[in-house]
Amino acid sequence: MTKIKLGIAGTHSTGKSTLITQLGTTLTERGFRVKCVSDLATEASNTGFPILQNHTFESTLWIMSRGISCELEASLQADVVLVDRPIMDAMAYLLAALNHRGCKLSPDESKYLFDLAQHHARTYAIICKTVLDSKIPLGAGRDQDLTFRAAVDGQFQSVFSKISVSPRIVETQSEFINFLVRDIEAALQS
């Protein structure tokens, strides 16, 4: 059977985890083996890497490489791997953090990360992007800097454009889940 990997990107508190949970439940009920790869920022922070406004080349590379590793491990045990924050997500956070601090990557660092994101993006069958709704409150324990949250959201278009990815935009979740399930089932049966 073909395996499929789906990534949900977006700034914090935009419904990624909720969408992944609902999609995972639906797919499991339909008999598919599903594994989820969770957001790695907390793990990065616990390891000692700076995140959010303090993201660096090194913390971004760690999140990206750890994400790839987790995705590969999950694919050993699943028909469908659902990724809460595909690796290009870390790039949007890094760019927002660099702008926030008035810093830049070296050309070599930028090329390294964007090349990695572009090559790895090809491994996702579907990439989705949530929409920031500033009326939805931030989740518990989330960074409260609304300006930075919006800045991250604004960087996604730049990242997706640079790595030649056109994500599906998540509209209403219930309808969107039905479309995703249909597309995943079709891809797995091909």
Image (tube, rainbow, N blue to C red):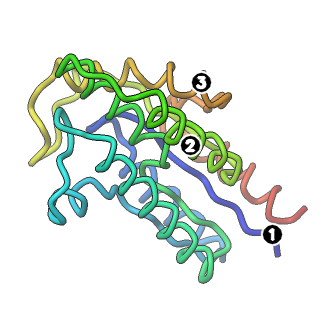
Disc 2 residue type (three-letter): Ala
Q: Residue 169 location, x and y as percent?
A: 56, 28
> In x, y percent, where is residue 177?
57, 46
Q: In the image, is residue 34 above or below residue 103?
A: below
Tag 1 residue: 2
Q: Residue at x 47, y 69 (%)?
A: 70
Viewer-proximal residue among 66 and 137: 66
Q: CA distance from mark 3 to mark 2?
A: 10 Å
Q: Is tag 3's residue or tag 2's residue first in the polypeptide sequence?
A: 2
Across and down, in percent, residue 137 comes to 16, 31
- For label 1, the crowd category at 10 Å Cα-Cα, with few meaning under 14, some 14 to 19 and many 20 or more, is few
Hey, what amino acid is under mark 1? Answer: Thr
Q: Residue 19, how many percent across, how many down?
A: 44, 48
Query: Which tag is nearer the camera, tag 1 or tag 3?
Result: 3
Tag 2: Cα neighbours inside 10 Å, few (<14), some, or many (≥20)? many
In the image, taking residue 159 as reference, residue 75 lies left or right, namely right
Image-quadrant location for residue 168: top right
**Helix, strand or loop at disc 2?**
helix
> Which mark sits nearer the N-terminus, 2 or 1?
1
Distance CA(mark 1)–CA(mark 3): 29 Å
**Residue at 20% over, 44% down:** 51
- The amino acid marked with disc number 3 is Lys
Q: Residue at x 21, y 16 (%)?
A: 102
Tag of residue 162:
3
Q: Secondary structure at mark 3?
A: helix
Does residue 107 appear to the left or right of 39 in the view shown? right
* Disc 3 and disc 2 in contact, CB within 8 angstroms: no
The disc label shown at residue 117, or none? 2
In this view, the residue in front, 58 or 21, is: 58
Residue furthest to the bottom: 77
Q: Nearer the viewer, residue 70 or 106?
A: 106
